Amino acid sequence: MFGKEENINNFEIEEKDVVKLLSGKTFTDENFPVASFVIKKDIQEYIRAFYFFARTADDIADHSTLPSKEKVKILTYFDYILKVEKKTSITALNNIINFFPEISFAKKYSRNLLKAFLMDAKGKKYRNWDDLVFYCKYSANPVGRFVIDLIYQKKKLQQKNFEEIYVASDCLCTSLQIINHLQDCKKDFLQLERVYIPEFFLKKHSLNKEIFYIKKSHVNFFNLVHEIVEKVEIMLVKSSKGLKMIKPWGLRKETLIILNIAKRLCYLLRINDVLRKNVKLSRIDLIFCFIKGIMN
């Protein structure tokens, strides 16, 4: 993934220093449930361990003062540790490695996530929609596929309709990632100098990065957000049918809850201005999405 293995010593890090770089955020800080009550407790621990691994890597990639070179060094070291399954003093890495003998796919999905975090660390630019979807292929989609594979394996269920289910999961996860990009677009630029909105859309609406310094509404940016939300909503419609094919009740309900959360966020992004307001779900919104998801 990163070149010749014999050069890996160039990426050795002080493991104890990694902890100091972490944000302290947990799954309770997310817009969507991370193994909620509809998922059995014996499975929740796997999902949350995978989440904390992703959170750890994300904190490195998003650190506001850490130089890009150091981010790449740490994330490259993480990938090497996963590849050789070496224990470290980094809890999040150890926890995910502990699962490898039992759920071998965890290795593939965790290493795929690191590809996205390395894109972030290197300051990747997104020229068009396809560039952004490619990023989401690694930043978001492995999470959905990990959860699906995990629950089907744990319940010893035959994998039926998996191509349709994977496509549905990918559409949902990619949608959530892009929604999050829109929610955080101003913060991402001001704090990290990172822009996930593809250059194509900025140029189409006669905008540039200066728009993120503006504290008032701008009709062109409002139209840009609407155009991206429309594309996301198309993916969510495509996602719905496949999610309903998921056999385990808890997993099916969890994904439908998340689908309703994504739909609600799209609505909120349409009626609010992300340049002026932090767009997020209210507690009532969340309750409504849970109820609707479980009843579907």
Image: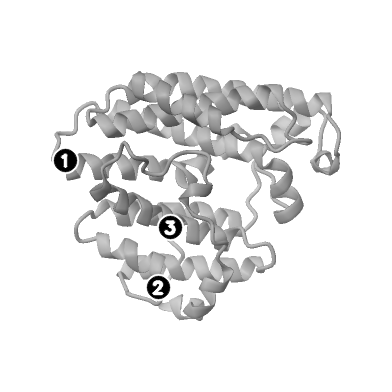
Residue 234 x %, y %: 52, 20
Q: Quadrant of residue 21?
A: bottom right
Res. 144 in view: yes
Between disc 2 and disc 3, the foreground one is 3
Q: Which residue is mark 1?
A: 155
Pick the quarter of the image with the N terminus.
Answer: bottom left
136 relative to 156 in the view: left or right: right
Q: Amino acid at mark 2?
A: Glu
Residue positioned 33% across, 53% down in the render: 108
* Mark found first going from the N terminus, 2 or 3: 2
Element carrying mark 3: helix
Q: Quadrant of residue 102?
A: bottom left
Q: Do tag 2 and tag 1 residues touch (Cβ < 8 Å)?
A: no
> How many residues crowd mark 3 within 10 Å: few (<14), some (14–19), many (20+)?
some
Residue 122 vertical placement versus 259 (above, below): below
> How many residues crowd mark 2 within 10 Å: few (<14), some (14–19), many (20+)?
few
Pick the quarter of the image with the C terminus.
Answer: top left
Q: Looking at the image, which is closer to me, 83 or 246?
A: 246
Between disc 2 and disc 1, the foreground one is 1
Residue positioned 51% across, 81% down in the render: 14
Q: Which residue is mark 2?
A: 5
Residue 139 x %, y %: 49, 47
Q: Which mark is residue 52?
A: 3
CA–CA distance in space, label 3 to label 1: 23 Å
Residue 128 vertical placement versus 111 (above, below): above
* Mark found first going from the N terminus, 3 or 1: 3
Residue 151 x %, y %: 24, 41
